[in-house]
Image: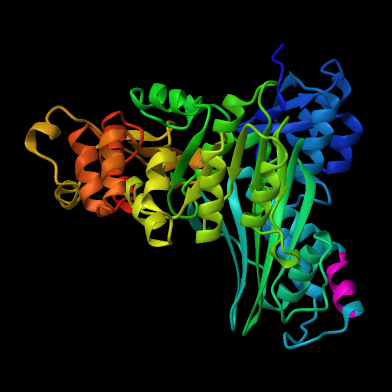
Amino acid sequence: METITYQQYPAKPVVVGSLSALFMKQSRFVPLHLEDDTLKIAMADPGDFYTVDALRLACNLTVEVAQGREEDILDAIERLYGTGSQSLEMIIEEAGRDATDISSEGMVDADHLRDLASEAPIIRLVNRLIVNAVEVRASDIHLEPFENQFKVRYRIDGILHDVESPPNRLKDAVVSRVKIMAKMDIAERRLPRDGRIKLKVTDREIDLRVSTLPTIFGESLVMRILDREALILDLEKLGLPDDLLPQYEELITKPYGMILVTGPTGSGKTTTLYTTLAKINSPENKIITLEEPVEYQLHGINQIQVNAKIGMTFANGLRSIVRQDPDIILVGEIRDKETAETAIQSALTGHLLFSTLHTNDAAGAVTRLLDIGVENFLLSSTLLGILAQRLVRVICPRCKRRIEPEAKLLRAMNLSPAELSGVEFFAGAGCDECTHTGFRGRIGIFEYLPVDDDIRREITARSSTERIKDVAQEKGLLTLRQDGWNKVKRGFTTLSEVLRVTLEK
């Protein structure tokens, strides 16, 4: 008999006549799918012929039975049919029937807000919004108030998507419910606030980082979903090119110096650095990180959170870290001259230091540091290498199909006939697996600039970004767009994705 794992249970409820959740719980079974006149179910006790016969007669269907764990079945019933997991549309309809509207200006009676947020339909609505987001692999949930609309959007693979939204009059209750979960002051709605929620969703520990911002129509709230199980801690899976991976692995084993990872917000810098630290973490190394905020806890690594309100800045924290006798230091971001100078001094005094910068490419990191006031001779003697990166969406393997690319995309890539020869192009048609986007997951594209003697001479001469890049390309530097093109040729992504995340090179 077939045995069903939890991952094989449906993401949405299978509706079978008037079948009740109570009967499913009592009989320890859950519907898996209904096709034509055949209903497939998972049962904790497949030998319970009484239940199978009752189903067959009541629903006038052929019943196929598979073995399932009782805990998984009960959890699936609660998730799919229970009080915490009706369909979003049903919950929104239920929540909207009795909700009252309140003013969005200034201080509001906290007890009234708490009463609204404690109503069962509102609790179910917020829970379902979070569970749905986790199930579709969203990284962020956006709750946005407008004049006549309360909009909910999920960020999936870096792109925002509209989802079913509650009525506008529920916005205060929904936002207040999230703030209660995050232990935030629900009465104060005039100032930005931050909080954190820890909860369990389908057997996974999920952290939600909550941020509120007052707008003219109410509070805008964003929940950042931090799922440690979704964190990739394998350099080979990040998308580093085959020829670059050994170079980077050698770079991160250097005894001292500074290594930078650059790119805009949301380009995967934190994931790359966490994966790097996991790679070099060992009992012989003491690793300390200074982050704002700490997104994921890493085993065996000392992680410190920046708090500017009490004077715990990157620069101050870094000075204290050095006195803790670390071997490897991660500074979340270099933002100013003080942090940059302290980081360079740490690298000079025998530490391997990792950090990030918001620059468009690898060469731009050098000129950015020089521009904020770092001495060129110090930078040239400490900098080991710079990795620039972006994230592109991966074509969904289930609905992947061959296509003919648009001429304008080929022109934008500035490709020669020789480069196009024999290349097959693919795209996703859209399916349930990828929520009809044509993409599922993301992969990195990279540009690596090793700092050798030639680059050091350019740094000492305070050369421009263009000059440093020209020298690097003469020595074989592969740009972000070129690495993106290689991933298009290998069928990982599309031309439009590469063009979306890269500047003209």
Quarter of image, res 495 = top left
Up/down of 66 relative to 311, above or below: above
Q: Is residue 226 left or right of residue 394?
A: right
- Please state the total of marks drawn on the protein image: 0
Q: Is residue 432 left or right of residue 452?
A: right
Q: Is residue 113 left or right of residue 428?
A: right
Q: Is residue 255 left or right of residue 113?
A: left
Up/down of 292 relative to 109, above or below: above
Q: Is residue 18 visible?
A: no
Residue drawn at (72%, 82%), measured in percent from left and top? 190
| Residue 118 shown in magenta | yes
Up/down of 163 relative to 198, above or below: below
Residue drawn at (37%, 43%), measured in percent from left and top? 380
Residue drawn at (87%, 19%), measured in percent from left and top? 48
| Residue 136 shown in magenta | no
Residue 480: % across, % down = 31, 42
The figure's colour scheme reads rainbow
Residue 125: % across, % down = 75, 60
- The outermost residue toward the top is 1
Image quarter where the N terminus lies is top right
Residue 334: % across, % down = 52, 54
Quarter of image, res 391 = top left
Bounds of the magenta span? 112-119
Q: Nearer the viewer, residue 323 or 168?
A: 323
Q: Nearer the viewer, residue 356 or 411?
A: 356
Q: Nearer the viewer, residue 203 or 331?
A: 331
How would you classify the magenta stretch by its main secondary structure? helix
Up/down of 401 relative to 78, above or below: above
Q: Is residue 124 visible?
A: yes
Residue 242: % across, % down = 36, 23
- The outermost residue toward the left is 417
